[in-house]
Image (tube, rainbow, N blue to C red):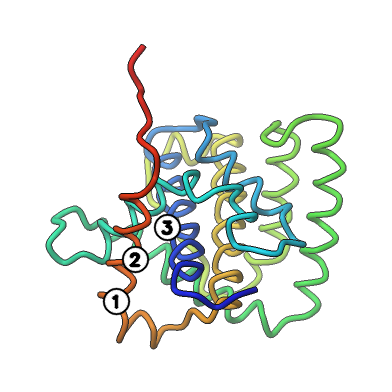
Amino acid sequence: MPHSLNDRVLTFAGIFQAAELVRRTATQGRKIDNDIETCISSLFKTDVESVEEIYQHSSHLRLGLSTLIAQIDRDSGRRDNEITRYVITLLHLEKKLSQRQDLLDSIADGIKNASAQVTYFSLTHESVIASLADLYQNTISTLSPKIIVSGEPGLLQDPDNANLIRALLLCGIRSAMAWRQCGGSRWALLFKRQAILSEAKNILDKLPCIDTRV
């Protein structure tokens, strides 16, 4: 996989998209949309030749790019500490996961099983989401630190919401893995923040406008 700045920013945006969707689900409840489908779909893109293939197209990362920009741009005034915490913890957990071949093998097997379910149901069917949630709980959740999701207690206790949150966290791990494979590192975040920010803005500015009028 090429180690370009563009690729690193896209995979980084994938992490932020998953984190923002976790926040939304925890505070607003389960709502399946294109952004969630992009994240879930990325879990099954394991044999790709480019980063764009993971997310189908960079336009599907509009939410992730805008969230990334809001979080790392000191002048944005739109930072969310919860999203920052989710992203940092996902990066930390992925690094630990990379050293556990047993868990990596379990995740690969789990994704293969979930892929078979997608054939019979659909990408975001509740049975598929539940399987991905169980996979997260049996693998990533065994590592520390655990991700503590903040939100509305009633929503967090709902099984469908909880399953979607865990599945999205698994999606965040998948993007974190791609980010590292593309050369992403904590040092890059520390010393190349401005370059990452500029590239994210450049990618977002070039995305086609979407007319949401009805």
Query: Residue 72's spot in the image, x, y percent?
Result: 26, 66
Q: Nearer the viewer, residue 34 or 199?
A: 199
Q: How many marks?
A: 3
Q: Mark 3 falls on what kind of element?
A: helix
Tell me where residue 69 sits by quadrant: bottom left
Query: Residue 104's spot in the image, x, y percent?
Result: 76, 72
Tell me where residue 110 sits by quadrant: bottom right
Q: Nearer the viewer, mark 1 or mark 2?
A: 2
Q: Nearer the viewer, mark 3 or mark 2?
A: 2
What is the CA distance from the residue labelled 3 to the residue labelled 1?
15 Å
Residue at the disc numbered 1: 193
Query: Residue 208's spot in the image, x, y percent?
Result: 39, 39
Looking at the image, the residue that sits furthest to the top is 214
Q: Residues within 10 Å of mark 1 (few under 14, many from 20)?
A: some
What is the CA distance from the residue labelled 3 to the residue labelled 2?
15 Å
In the displayed structure image, the side of residue 57 where residue 213 appears, left or right: left
